[in-house]
């Protein structure tokens, strides 16, 4: 009998502690420089990244039998893992809960849609889907942008000519570093991304070479002078590399390590005199 009473007491204490933890847990701090690379490969697509405060999230899609399916490789697509189910519906629900934002009083976040199938055909299927969610997506019209909870940006196979010709769009284009030479409209290409390994030899080991640090600094300055953001993929998940990207002013830091980057960026924000 005593054993039963003791067990019951332990259970009750556990419940109280759990409820106290839930009540005291503060909402995540939005991290505007955190980009969840291949987000769909996490246990809970979108939700794990939002729990860590990420403000940029990447989903790869294939057009298969008229459906926009989320996967890294075509062999891995599943009919139930649609862009709508994994991302658009949950984002709409979050925006409803937080008065038109994904985070309460937070910034517009980025949904980077990496198209893996044919550019034109996939965009033809994506266009009406994004319009259906016009209540949450930034609208681009007549050279102006009207910000909403989420800005959709197409990467990968990009139907650039189709998008550029549209008078009203609910998506922009992820450019590449050579686009900085032609300086296209920032409303068409608000973000430029490129493969780190194609431009830099340093992988986060030892000292960042001075020449490469200067090259990075100049690329960031040139991008910001055109009012765009910059991102690199293919970067190792190392604090040393994150530190250099942050110091140079890179806008979106790519990672598969959600918790690791969250701890790093939160420490940067908490450091005296830091505003990144």
Image: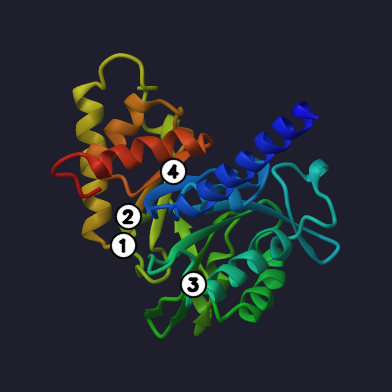
Which residue is under mark 3? 98
Label 4 environment density (alpha carbons within 10 Å; few <14, some 14–19, many ≥20)? some
Residue for point 83% across, 51% down:
78
Which residue is under mark 1? 183
Sequence-first tag of 1 and 3: 3
Which residue is under mark 4? 194
CA–CA distance between discs 2 and 4?
A: 12 Å
Residue 125, located in which quarter of the rendered image?
Answer: bottom right
Which residue is under mark 2? 180
Label 2 environment density (alpha carbons within 10 Å; few <14, some 14–19, many ≥20)? some
Indicate whether 40 appears above or below 158: above
Which tag is nearer the camera, tag 3 or tag 4? 3
Residue for point 56% across, 76% down:
96
Sequence-first tag of 2 and 3: 3
Dot 3: what SS? loop
* Mark 1–mark 2 CB contact (< 8 Å): yes
* Mark 1–mark 3 CB contact (< 8 Å): no
CA–CA distance between discs 1 and 3?
A: 36 Å
Dot 1: what SS? loop
At which x and y percent is residue 28?
Answer: 44, 52
In the shown orientation, is residue 125 left or right of residue 18?
right
CA–CA distance between discs 4 and 1?
A: 16 Å
Furthest residue toward front: 1
Residue 9 circle label: none
């Amino acid at each position: 009998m005593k054993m039963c009473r003791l067990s019951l007491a332990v259970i009750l204490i556990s419940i109280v502690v759990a409820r106290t933890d839930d009540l005291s847990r503060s909402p995540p701090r939005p991290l505007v420089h955190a980009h969840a690379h291949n987000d769909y490969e996490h246990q809970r697509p979108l939700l794990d990244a939002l729990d860590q405060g990420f403000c940029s999230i990447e989903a790869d899609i294939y057009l298969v039998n008229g459906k926009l399916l989320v996967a890294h490789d075509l062999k891995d697509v599943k009919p139930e893992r649609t862009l709508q189910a994994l991302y658009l519906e949950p984002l709409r629900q979050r925006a409803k809960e937080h008065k038109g934002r994904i985070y309460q009083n937070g910034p517009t976040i980025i949904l980077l849609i990496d198209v893996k199938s044919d550019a034109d055909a996939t965009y033809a299927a994506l266009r009406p889907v994004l319009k259906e969610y016009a209540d949450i997506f930034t609208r681009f019209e007549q050279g102006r942008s009207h910000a909403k909870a989420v800005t959709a940006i197409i990467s990968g196979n990009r139907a650039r000519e189709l998008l550029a010709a549209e008078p009203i769009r609910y998506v922009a284009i992820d450019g590449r570093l050579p686009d900085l030479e032609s300086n296209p409209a920032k409303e068409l290409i608000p973000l430029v991304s490129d493969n780190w390994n194609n431009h830099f030899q340093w992988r986060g080991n030892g000292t960042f070479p001075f020449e490469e640090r200067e090259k990075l600094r100049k690329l960031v300055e040139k991008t910001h002078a055109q009012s765009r953001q910059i991102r690199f993929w293919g970067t190792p998940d190392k604090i040393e590399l994150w530190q250099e990207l942050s110091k140079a002013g890179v806008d979106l830091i790519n990672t598969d390590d959600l918790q690791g980057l969250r701890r790093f960026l939160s420490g940067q924000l908490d450091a005296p005199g830091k505003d990144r």
